[in-house]
Image (spheres, grey):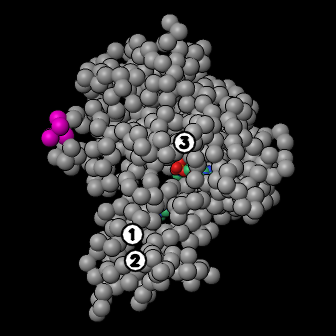
Amino acid sequence: MQEIKNNLYNAFENVLSKDLDKTLLVLQNGQKLTRRNVVKQSARIANTLKSLNAEPGDRISIQTEKVTDSIALYLACLRGGFVYHPLNPDYTSSEVSYFFEDADPTIIICDPKNEDTYKTLFGLPKKIPILTLSNRGKGSLISRSKSQSTEYRTHACTADSLVALVYSSGTTGKPKGVMLSHNNLISNAKTLIKTWKLSEADCLIHALPIFHVHGLFVGINCCLLTGGSMIFLPRFDSETVIESIPRATLMMGVPTYYNRLLKSGKLSHSKCKKIRLFISGSAPLRMDTFNDFKQATNHEIVERYGMTETLMNTSNPVDHLRKAGSVGLPLEGIATRIVNQTNEVGELEVKGPNVCLGYWRQDEATKQSLTSDGFFRTGDQARKDGNGYITIVGRKTDLIISGGLNVYPVEVETVINNIEDVLECTVFGTSDDDFGETVTAVVVRKDGSQLNAEKIIALTKQELASYKVPKAVLFVSTLPRNTMGKIQKDIIKQQFIK
Ligand code: MLC
Ligand code: AMP
């Protein structure tokens, strides 16, 4: 009995079962789904996955749009003890091949448009069942689920059982699967609920994608654990979000969302009076965005900081000073320290029940990510002020965060360097009012080549998801190198940044 309670689904069930008629999701078309609708659908889906021989611990790889049944599918994985493995629907077949190969799923669930390709590429050799899911109950997952029972006995697991595999790119090598446990998710959601004073009365504007921890484990888990409701939007779109604001009490987003809401010119104090909190994370929130947003809405955005490997680490408080430019104070139960400081800036390390189990099938990388006393090395450079507020001042790596999505230059450089007529290139982030940072490539062409920026962009797009594709491509005759022969990215960057 004790063991059963360790499944995150049991924690949700305790809350949801109190009033199954309460609305859980309001969709973009106004349709409302009650808790009962979602709970029953999750049982049908869990039974379907089980009927295809999925066993607890097996990975279910999911690359679909954000659709009506997405939450029921997530809950189905929890109930079955299956490992939820979400993927960005924008990934190309070549990107996705790597993830399927590495995660080694028992079932793949994809958008109908990819079914034939994936069946040929991944289904046949390993006989992996490939199901489809699209909006409003379409696709083979839901058609198969219709005849299934609406009851499912939730899998009993330990607190440390693997619940989700979310990939995070590495600077070198390939992306690594971050192994998250039931306890990681439960403890982090409980801490956030306390910090942000979330309750059953809250209604969250959920416009974030659900293939990353922000939309999934901050947005959805907090809502399911409090018994609140969500305006569940397929994607962020300023118009729809602005229309939704008067009906909501909470919004979570990346800084680009707040930049775009401001740019719309349609915010006002009265429109936002029902909102309790606007929360931002996944990328630095600029001070001018914080200040302009306050002026436009009378709300100070609550900035928090986290990462896939650790879920959320810090947040500005709700009842005390929300410091512009700072990611706030360590969350309860999470220890933070700043090591190897120069001028008070050093690498931020964190320890607590939020830190992941490690990297999937990569023991060496797991070992390297932790110190001997169990702190996780975030790779973020930070400073702490006298009151304990933490400011992220940079990163150890040359990671680009564009609209809250991470791009590792080396991945883009590899694709561009493989283009015929490219001699060499370097890729870095440049500051952008909308995305915070965007991807820029500086390329050296082979002698006599007429290769242009459009062609490079088009060829890169065949290989990589569009958020990784450079928004600007510039040409030079040589790239400066240091005495070791390494391209001096900083010098080039300075030349191009105004
Ligand atoms: C889409 N594009 C992007 C992009 N998203 N380009 C750069 N950066 C992005 N983030 C592509 C589109 O495919 C399109 O390509 C072109 O850029 C312009 O698209 P758009 O219409 O402006 O983009 P849009 O669809 O509106 O998406 C932008 C966005 C979205 C910011 C709304 O990317 C988004 O919702 N981001 C949130 C990411 C997130 O959830 N991060 C959390 C990670 S978890 P084309 O070729 O068609 O023109 C984490 C831990 C933590 O970091 O602390 O939370
Ligand atoms: P990911 O690996 O995709 O989860 O991205 C995590 C990274 O996003 C962190 O290591 C930080 O570099 C960055 N990040 C998240 N939240 C913030 C924030 N509020 N301010 C600055 N950087 C952030």
Disc 1: which residue: 413
Disc 3: which residue: 370
Instruction: Please say whether residue 308 is one of the residues in the magenta stretch.
Output: no
**Residue at 41% across, 90% down:** 477
Disc on the earlier residue, 2 or 1 = 1
Left or right: 335 as drawn, with respect to 63 = right
Instruction: Give coordinates of residue 141: x percent, y percent.
Output: 30, 31
Instruction: Give coordinates of residue 363: x percent, y percent.
Output: 41, 39
Dot in front, 3 or 2: 3
Instruction: Please say whether residue 124 is one of the residues in the magenta stretch.
Output: yes
The amino acid on which the numbered mark 3 sits, given as a three-letter code, is Leu
Q: Are marks 2 and 1 in contact (CB under 8 Å)?
A: yes
The amino acid on which the numbered mark 2 sits, given as a three-letter code, is Cys
Q: Label for residue 425?
A: 2
**Residue at 58% across, 53% down:** 379
**Residue at 46% across, 72% down:** 427
Residues rendered magenta in the picture: 123-127
Disc on the earlier residue, 3 or 2 = 3
Image quarter hosting the C terminus: bottom right
Quick one: label 2, few (<14), some, or many (20+) residues within 10 Å?
A: many
The amino acid on which the numbered mark 1 sits, given as a three-letter code, is Glu
Disc on the earlier residue, 1 or 3 = 3
- The quarter holding residue 267 reads bottom right
484 relative to 370, above or below:
below
**Residue at 46% across, 41% down:** 366
Magenta stretch prevailing secondary structure: helix
Alpha carbons under labels 1 and 3: distance apart: 29 Å
Left or right: 254 as drawn, with respect to 116 = right
Quick one: label 3, few (<14), some, or many (20+) residues within 10 Å?
A: some
